[in-house]
Structure formats: C-alpha cells, structure tokens
C-alpha cells in the first residue's frame, strides 16, 4: 500500500476551498480507517507528520516502522510492515540534494528498507519517496527518480540480490512525462526532450550568488502534468508553503521558472544521455507499474469497468502504451486533478511479478468537488494497494 497522507502542517484553506475536513481532529479517524482497511503487509506513507498519534495506531495494529525526513522538514516518509511477517535487515535514506546534477535544493528524500521474512531467508526491498512538487522542474524530478531507482537497485544488490524490490510513493509526475518513460526504460519522445531541456536550469537555492544579469526572465512552461489543472491554482501543491517558501516573479507560480540561470558546464547537470545512463539496468528486467499492469490485464480478460478507472484517455495515451492504465486520478482537489502516485516493481533476475489484485481506483464521480472530503478520503491523495506474487522463471 502507498498513500500520501497530506501532512497537517501543510494544510491551507486556500489550497482546499471545498474541503469539509481540514482540521486535524476531523481527519484522524478517517486516516486510520483508510490506512488499516486494506490490511496490507507493507505500507509506504508520504507527508507523514503527527507521529505521536500515528505510530501508536500502527503499533497496536501489529506494524513495525522506519521513518525518515529531509533536513528541517516537519513531515517525512514512513515504511511500516507487519512484524509477524517481516523483520528489518537495514535501511537507508537517500538525500537527493547531496547527489550530482542538482538544479534545485529541494530537501526531498527517499527512504529504503530491506525486509526479511520471519519464516525464511526470502525478503523484499521497499523504497518510498515524495519527489519535488513544482510542475515546471521536470529535469529535477527526472534526476531524483533516476537516483532513487539506481540507489534502490544498489541497496538490493547488497542485502538480497534475488529479492524483489518495490518503489512506491508520490512521484509528482504524470504517466506521459519524461520521468515515467525513463522509470520504465521507454524511449524519450521529442516532446520529453524539449521539456527536459526547458527545465534544465540552476536555481538560486543551489547558487545564491546568481548575478542579476544572469537571472533568466520568468518563463512559463507548458506542463504535461497539469493539462487538466485549473489555472486559478494558488501557491504550491503543498510541498512548499511555509517550508520551501514561494517563488517571486509573477505569473502562476506552479508554471513559471523564476530565480534561475542557465546551466554552466561546471554545474554538472545531466544531459539526456547521462540521465538515461542513470536509469540503465544492465541485465535486470525493466521495471513495471503494478496498476498499469494489473488494470491492463483485467481489460484483456474482459473487465468492463477498467476504461472508467484509467487515465489514458484523459491524457491522450494510446491504450497500447505504458501508462495508459494507471488510475484515472490519484490526486484530486478543487484546483488540481492528476495521476501522480505509483507502485513500481523491480523484478530480480530470474523472477517475474504478477499482480493478483488491486485496490480499485476511485472514479471521478466518487471524489466530489475535491479532496479531502468526509466519507471519501482524509487526504488530497487516494491510497493505492496491490497484492503481488513473484515466481521463479524456468531456466
């Protein structure tokens, strides 16, 4: 299971004008119910705060946990697992800002754990993350996703080379963006390359000494991920106000690159070839998405409800292309309605994953005029859950 909980410290009325449950006390019971209802063996959470309330609930329900957050952040990423099924072998925090190719100091992280089954030597590697929220910074988000996949594979090689790995979380990119194609080892289109090039900048958070004459004129970026957004959106999506701060420069702050300069060779930003190299898997199978695979399989088997639960038609993705069967929406508010959350599977060599069951995606008509909403969800994101099986391939 994966779920962005919507940290209480990030809630602002102006961002969720139609919500009827923004106060912490209103959201708690709903949060616990949605969190525990799937009875998941492993849970990945983002925007996790109020740990003094959440962790006792998880403990009572039979879960151990591992939590990490970025520098000076009031919320973070939590991975929980049933203690009667798994024990923790090791964990790692990936600080994206400390890695090469940085264009914007975002303070985002990934959290990775290796879990061994209590009744055998088998295990699984689980990673969760919340990538940079700003829609215009396509390069930075693609870089972060590449580092996440590379680090997860290296962590698995150390602790369980034959174990499957899951990367789940809020990726803040849509299925037709460059980062999604790169995650699944698909070729970049000319549109992907153009958007990467347009967002390959250096922000003042990386170079505070940017000279006034170097600052790029605020530039509106055409954003694949926000094609359905209401242009009245205020401020940020939630991963910034009061934390990262708000950009100055006028225009819609979700669509404008401000306080940036063009990159120089010494900045070390990654070109397309270097980005693709970061995602290179060697002999490992290409990753897949649990929801894209699972919903596609249901459609092939004759299920008639899948078209109402997938994003492909809304985003103009051919039904035969990867990403077409991701949930119609995973983030649904008055201002933005997007598919941003995924469960990616990294099969080990010699094994193949199978999606047995999925938590059914919400249909748009179920989500009212925007989340959070009483009786629907305590967060602006909906939870995703999958029952998975790995089998050995015959030699």
Image (cartoon, helix red, strand yellow):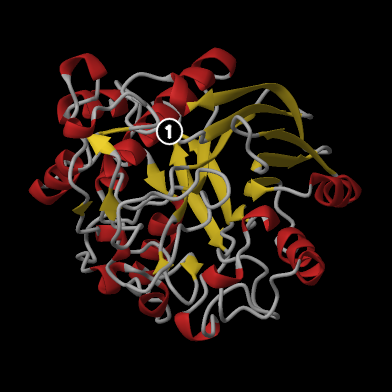
Q: Is residue 47 left or right of residue 65?
A: left
- Residue 60 position, x and y percent, is 91, 49
Q: Is residue 124 left or right of residue 139?
A: right
Q: Is residue 210 above or below residue 53?
A: above
Name the residue: 26% across, 45% down: 181
Q: Is residue 121 above or below residue 141?
A: above
Q: Is residue 337 above or below residue 383?
A: below
Q: Secondary structure at mark 1?
A: loop
Whether residue 394 can be seen here:
no
- Residue 94 position, x and y percent, is 53, 25
Q: Image quadrant of residue 59?
A: top right
- Residue 103 position, x and y percent, is 32, 30
Q: Which is nearer the eye, 115 or 133? A: 133
Residue reaching furthest to the front: 212
Q: Which is nearer the eye, 129 or 126? A: 129
- Residue 165 position, x and y percent, is 52, 33
**Residue located beneath label 1 in the image:** 393
Name the residue: 29% across, 68% down: 312
């Amino acid at each position: 299971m994966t779920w962005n909980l919507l940290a209480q410290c990030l809630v602002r009325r102006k961002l969720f004008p139609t919500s009827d449950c923004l106060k912490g006390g209103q959201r708690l019971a709903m949060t616990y119910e949605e969190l525990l209802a799937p009875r998941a063996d492993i849970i990945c959470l983002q925007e996790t705060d109020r740990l003094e309330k959440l962790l006792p609930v998880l403990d009572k329900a039979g879960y151990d946990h591992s939590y990490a957050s970025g520098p000076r952040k009031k919320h973070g990423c939590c991975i929980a697992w049933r203690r009667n099924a798994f024990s923790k072998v090791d964990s790692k925090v990936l600080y994206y800002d400390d890695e090469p190719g940085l264009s914007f100091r975002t303070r985002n992280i990934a959290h990775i754990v290796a879990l061994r089954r209590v009744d055998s030597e088998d295990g699984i590697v689980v990673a969760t993350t919340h990538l940079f929220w700003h829609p215009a910074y396509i390069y930075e988000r693609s870089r972060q996703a590449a580092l996440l996949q590379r680090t997860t594979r290296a962590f698995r090689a150390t602790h369980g080379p034959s174990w499957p790995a899951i990367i789940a979380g809020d990726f803040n990119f849509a299925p037709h963006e460059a980062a999604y194609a790169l995650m699944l080892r698909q070729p970049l289109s000319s549109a992907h390359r153009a958007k990467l090039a347009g967002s390959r900048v250096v922000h003042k958070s990386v170079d505070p000494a940017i000279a006034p004459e170097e600052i790029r004129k605020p530039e509106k970026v055409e954003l694949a991920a926000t094609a359905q957004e209401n242009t009245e959106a205020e401020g940020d999506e939630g991963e910034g106000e009061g934390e990262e701060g708000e950009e100055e420069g006028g225009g819609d702050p979700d669509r404008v690159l401000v306080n940036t300069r063009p990159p120089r060779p010494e900045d070390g930003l990654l070109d397309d070839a270097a980005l693709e190299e970061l995602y290179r898997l060697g002999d490992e199978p290409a990753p897949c998405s649990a929801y894209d695979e699972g919903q596609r399989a249901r459609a092939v088997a004759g299920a008639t409800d899948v078209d109402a639960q997938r994003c492909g038609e809304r985003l103009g993705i051919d039904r035969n292309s990867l990403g077409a069967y991701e949930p119609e929406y995973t983030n649904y508010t008055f201002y933005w309605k997007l598919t941003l959350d995924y469960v990616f599977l990294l099969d080990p060599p010699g094994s193949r994953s199978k999606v047995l069951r999925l938590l059914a995606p919400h249909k748009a008509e179920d989500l009212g005029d925007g989340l959070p909403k009483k009786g629907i969800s305590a967060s602006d994101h909906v939870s995703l859950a999958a029952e998975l099986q790995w089998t050995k391939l015959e030699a």
